Amino acid sequence: MGRSIQDNRNIKTVETENLQIEGHLMKWNDVAIQLSNISMITAAKLPAPRFPAWTTLLVFSGVAAFVFSQDTYGPQRVPMMFGGVCLFAVGIMGIIRWLVDFLKTVGHKYLQILLNSGYVYALYIPDQEFLKKVLGVFENIFRDGGKAGNHVQINIDNSTITGAVTGINRTKVINTGGRYVRGPSKH
């Protein structure tokens, strides 16, 4: 049985406002990927992040230090109480951080870009309908064989796609202010 893209531990989650496809390159922020290095693109959920066990250890250690400090008298009491409260607080912050990541990945699909090297970029696109449309743009580009005539600007924040994708049917993607319309190219 083959491995799934979900089993890949080399996933880098990306949040960006824009994604550009120019000729043979796909770019966002400070990353540029040659389209020929992409082996698969999918819209799928990310695996849920593992619960950090070290946070539980910190919380219990903090509680234990605080409780034992109540039986301590003298100069050790205050540092022991302070240490217990700090351990507890760091453990709770770790749990909150995990919970934020968990809630973000559980309910959403990501545009996952699997490279030939096995590395995966997962782009967060909050609008799930727009995610399907972005996947359709990539389908057109790959169907075309990644020719140099592609110039597409994907604005993730505004859910708009502008530019031209030259494909088998000379498809043009038109800016529609959030809607996705395909029509014949005028060149």
Image (cartoon, rainbow, N blue to C red):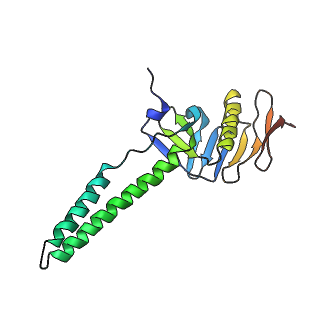
In the picture, measured across the screen, residue 186 lies left or right of residue 83, that is right
Q: Residue furthest top?
A: 1
Instruction: Using the rendered view, name the quadrant where residue 148 is placed.
Output: top right
Instruction: Using the rendered view, name the quadrant where residue 81 is placed.
Output: bottom left
Considering the image in quadrants, where does the C terminus appear?
top right
Q: Nearer the viewer, residue 146 or 15?
A: 15
Residue at the spot 33% in from the left edge and 62% down from the top edge: 90
Residue 12, image x, y percentages: 48, 45
Q: Nearer the viewer, residue 78 or 186?
A: 78
Residue 98, image x, y percentages: 41, 52
In the picture, measured across the screen, residue 33 lies left or right of residue 150, that is left
Exactly how many numbered labels are in the figure?
Answer: 0
Considering the image in quadrants, where does the N terminus appear?
top left
Q: Is residue 162 above or below residue 132?
A: below
Residue 31, image x, y percentages: 55, 48
Q: Is residue 81 visible?
A: yes
In the picture, measured across the screen, residue 181 lies left or right of residue 52, that is right
Residue 82, image x, y percentages: 25, 72
Residue at the spot 13% in from the left edge and 71% down from the top edge: 71
Q: Residue furthest right?
A: 186
Residue at the spot 63% in from the left edge and 54% down from the top edge: 17
Q: Nearer the viewer, residue 24 or 166?
A: 166
Residue at the spot 53% in from the left edge and 39% down from the top edge: 45
Q: Is residue 118 visible?
A: no
Q: Is residue 107 above or below residue 62?
A: above
